[in-house]
Image (spheres, rainbow, N blue to C red):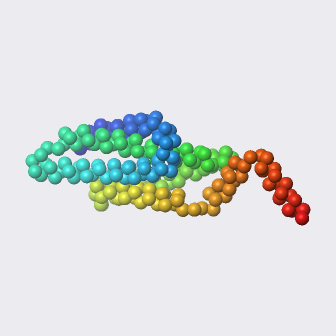
Amino acid sequence: LPPSSMAVVFAPAGVGLVVGSLFMPRIARRLGKSRTVFIGTISLAITVTLLPLLSLLTYLLQQHGIDFKPIQFLIAPIVMFAAGFEIDFINIPAQTAIQEHTPDWIKGRVLALQLMLYSAVSIPIILGIGVIADAFGIANVIYLVALCMLGFGLWGRYYERKPHKWTTRQTETEDADDIPEAEQSEQDEESNVQSIK
């Protein structure tokens, strides 16, 4: 697509972000935060892969005398809308989880650290993406980004299913909180008697 059409292509991504933010609370409650992030990561990787494949399909059809550019001009905004919607699958549940699991007294530090790490990682990539794209080709860079997202999604799913010490302690604490007060007082009395003995 010509550079003058980039606004038509990228504007649907912003619309997808806004629409996704409206539906995401309901989707996250139904699917759960971790599953929502996993689905968003995998689907975003697939959607990103469709962009260079769409250009490749247009090129191949043009070699056979078929003008596919008008259809490409219609499909590309739909793909970008889906990409914006899928980004909400990742960002909103992840930010919600950070807010929920971070204690209030350190929440500001955690959010500041997240912003600092985001800037530290993204700025070098933004500065060097032009050189990388010229060296390896835009399509290859997009494929690499999609592959990284796919790998990150699978790793995150594996890491979440892996047992951790802090989750075990948290589960024990939650189980203790669920015990009725009468049973809790009886257990406390028994423990006091045993300690006296």
Who's the residue at 49% across and 38% down the image? 26
**81 sits to left or right of 114:** left
Residue lying furthest left: 65
* Above or below: residue 197 compared with residue 75: below
Residue lying furthest right: 196
Who's the residue at 19% across and 39% down the image? 70
Residue lying furthest bottom: 197
* Above or below: residue 49 compared with residue 17: below
Q: Nearer the viewer, residue 16 or 132?
A: 16
Question: Residue 55: horizontal and vertical position, in percent?
Answer: 23, 49
In this rendering, the count of numbered labels is 0
Question: Residue 122: horizontal and vertical position, in percent?
Answer: 45, 52
**20 sits to left or right of 4:** right
Q: Nearer the viewer, residue 3 or 141?
A: 141
Who's the residue at 89% across and 64% down the image? 197
**152 sits to left or right of 166:** left
Q: Nearer the viewer, residue 95 or 175?
A: 175
Which image quarter holds the N terminus? top left
Q: Determine if residue 175 is in view.
A: yes
Question: Residue 22: horizontal and vertical position, in percent?
Answer: 46, 35
Who's the residue at 26% across and 41% down the image? 75
Question: Residue 46: horizontal and vertical position, in percent?
Answer: 34, 52
Q: Determine if residue 9 is in view.
A: no
